[in-house]
Amino acid sequence: MQLETYISDLLYRYDCVIVPQFGAFLTHRVSAKVHETTHSFYPPKKALSFNEQLQTNDGLLANYIAEVEKVPYQVAVEKIAKQVKAIKSYLIEGETIALNNIGDLILNTEGNINFEPSHHINYLTDAFGLSQFSSVNITREVHKETVEELEDVIPLTITPEKRKSRPYLKYAAIALIALTIGGFGASKFYAGQIENHNQLAQEEANEQLDAKVQEATFVIENPLPAATLTVEKPTGNYHIVAGAFRVEANSDKKVQQLRDLGFKARKIGVNRYGLHEVVYSSHTDRLEALKALRTIKRTHNRDAWLLVKAID
């Protein structure tokens, strides 16, 4: 039995895996970090450690082995004990026990177990697919200091440009302002004349309209006959049920869907289970209802059924 395989499987899902009468392998989450010297980036991981004091069987490892190997629980406990006994004997003889994907175990001079975890595997499932990588050092060119040094050596001077005087531009600007003011005044006067003319025309049109209205007479010689609408009210105790709904809004939606398809659908109330019942149609004649039910089952819904119920 490869004990380290089962321990490794459980470390992906649990933070503590106890090997009875031997010790416990513990994990704790470590955040991602960057090494400033080597410029290496390390993803988050589960750091692995070993505690020799935790030896009480919690059943986790034994149950997992029993499930995988299809053996009774007690047989799995005995297999673990046999494997632990062999590991301890090798440690006492001074050998290093290498547990694949977990780490190395060795007995120190004080008789305690030292554990060196393996760094080849990351038990943090959230970091699956992430690996360590290094980035080259980024060098940036600094131009500001160079410019400041040049300014200290060669000072820059700004000489204002002398402009020639052009007096004729002043007179052109005055003439342009005068033309603008004159044009604005003329535009205002013309707009005022148009507004007065439109107002007079509107008043004259209103007077003519009032006169026409006063002269007009309305005589209705042939009044239209009154319209009579006949609304067919669904009746009958034989109902073809389309479905029953816990939420009333869903029953309203179902009614509208069936009506769009041409059925005389409606709600017939709430049944004893608190469900809103929707029917394709209601009939007074039982044979007519059965005929309609067969048609609906054949063309639309095989689950439709006939309900006999008196509706107030």
Image: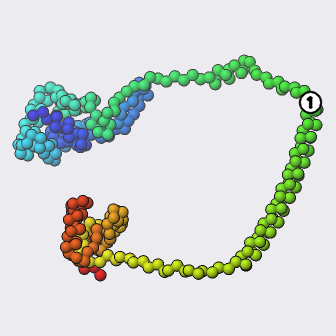
Q: How many marks?
A: 1
Amino acid bearing label 1 = Arg
Report the side of 14 relative to 142 (left or right).
left
* Relative depth, front residue between 146 and 68: 68
| Point 85% across, 52% down: residue | 187
Could you say where residue 106 lies in the image, as x and y percent from the top left?
A: 19, 29
Q: Is residue 110 above or below residue 251?
A: above
Could you say where residue 275 lies in the image, as x and y percent from the top left?
A: 27, 70
Could you say where residue 297 lies in the image, as x and y percent from the top left?
A: 21, 62
* Relative depth, front residue between 52 and 252: 252
Colouring method of the image: rainbow
Label 1 sits on residue: 166
> What crowding class fits label 1: few (fewer than 14 Cα within 10 Å), some (14-19), or many (20 or more)?
few
Dividing the picture into quarters, in which one does residue 171 lie?
A: top right
Dividing the picture into quarters, in which one does residue 142 lie?
A: top right
| Point 64% across, 20% down: residue | 146
Q: Quadrant of the C terminus?
A: bottom left
**Can the viewer see residue 56?**
no
* Relative depth, front residue between 37 and 233: 233
**Can the viewer see residue 156?**
yes
Q: Quadrant of the N terminus?
A: top left
The residue most toward the front is 221
Q: Is residue 185 above or below residue 151?
A: below
Q: Is residue 53 above or below residue 95?
A: below
| Point 68% across, 80% down: residue | 217
Could you say where residue 166 lies in the image, as x and y percent from the top left?
A: 92, 30
Q: Which element carries disc 1, helix, strand or loop?
A: loop
| Point 90% across, 48% down: residue | 182
